[in-house]
Image: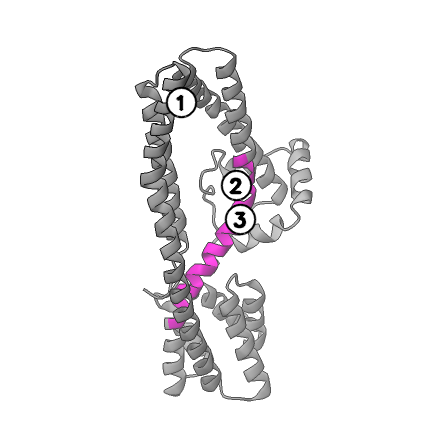
Amino acid sequence: MVKQTNTPIMMLFPIENAKKFSDKYLFLGRFLSRVIFSLKYDLQKSEIHIDPERYCLASLISAFIYSIMFIFVGLAFGAIITREIGVTTIIIMIILSISSFFGMLLFHLLYPKLASFQIAGLVDQDLLFALRTMLIQLSSGQSLFESIKNISKSNYGQVSKEFSLVVRDINSGISETEALEKLAFGTKSDILKKTAWQMITTLRSGGSIVNALNSQVEALVAQQMDSIKAYSAELNLWTLVYLIVAAAVPSLGITFLVIASSIGGSGIGPEAVILIVLLSMIIQMSMIMLIRSKVPKVVK
């Protein structure tokens, strides 16, 4: 599989620089990597080729940079709310800085797991068409190896990359079952893992690969239909929540602030209104991204 050298999303410290760390600075990263013991496997599954302790240290540095940036963000928010740089502004700066540090550190440490799920989703998205193509080729008399080789050379995205590993292993001299075993242990997709094991069992028992793939294709179609129905039902709830956040909360919030300020004898300035509108926009964009992330990974 092609090695990934790009820096993970939102990390401000390049991974390539992290690979050049001196060993004497790795004690902090080593401590974090021991706490999050699954990070080593998540990095492998997400194709981020770096030692876990170096990745953890890079995450710490990136989170620290974010905390410095949010000091200035806290200064801006504090000046807008209090209209002066005082104790309240300093408290806001400290809270935002500390929150951003731990928030981004947690995000960086969880990113490999999220990335591995994304790769698995890419496999699941193209797997149905790939299996149908294999089914047609096997039914027409092609061998299993030739069918896998054709899939690896076709435009099936992540599935073609996974199958190219199988072709490489078979060409190196190992058997088809051993190559499929490596695929089953190394893939991020539970569906492809199940398909590989089903093919292995069929090869060892001397059964029909065509029948095994046909049953797997039918199960995939049924699973995708169920996921679409579940997403459609969930989307109704998210639509209601989005309408509340987009329309009701900003208007009611501004109304409440106006009433509270009139009772307290103070006024509400345009800065507070702008701040509420900006926060509402950020929440709306976050919800849109969340809803998009829940779209079922089906064939387009």
- Circle 1/circle 3 CB separation < 8 Å: no
Q: In which quarter of the view is residue 173 placed?
A: bottom right
Q: Earlier in the sequence, mark 1 or mark 3?
A: 3
The residue that label 2 is drawn on is 107
Give the image location of residue 58, x and y in percent. Answer: 56, 36
**Is label 1 in a helix, a strand or a loop?**
helix
Q: Which residues are magenta?
A: 103-128
**Pair 2/3: label in front:** 2
Decide if residue 41 is on the left or right side of residue 130.
right
Image mark for residue 210 = none
Measuring 57% from the left and 77% from the top, which residue is drawn there?
177
254 lies above or below 207: above
Image mark for residue 112 = 3
Give the image location of residue 236, x and y in percent. Answer: 36, 56
Q: Earlier in the sequence, mark 2 or mark 3?
A: 2
Secondary structure character of the magenta stretch overall: helix
Image mark for residue 260 = 1
* Front residue (pair 257, 35): 257
Decide if residue 264 is on the left or right side of residue 180.
left
Q: Mark 2 Cα within 10 Å, few/some/many (few <14, many 20+)? A: some
**Is label 2 in a helix, a strand or a loop?**
helix
- Circle 1/circle 2 CB separation < 8 Å: no
**Separation of residues labelled 1 and 3 (CA atoms):** 46 Å
Q: Is residue 71 magenta?
A: no
Q: Amino acid at mark 1?
A: Ala
* Front residue (pair 173, 73): 73
39 lies above or below 125: above
Decide if residue 8 is on the left or right side of residue 282.
right
Q: How many marks?
A: 3
Decide if residue 262 is on the left or right side of residue 163.
left
Give the image location of residue 252, x and y in percent. Answer: 35, 33
Q: Amino acid at mark 3?
A: Pro
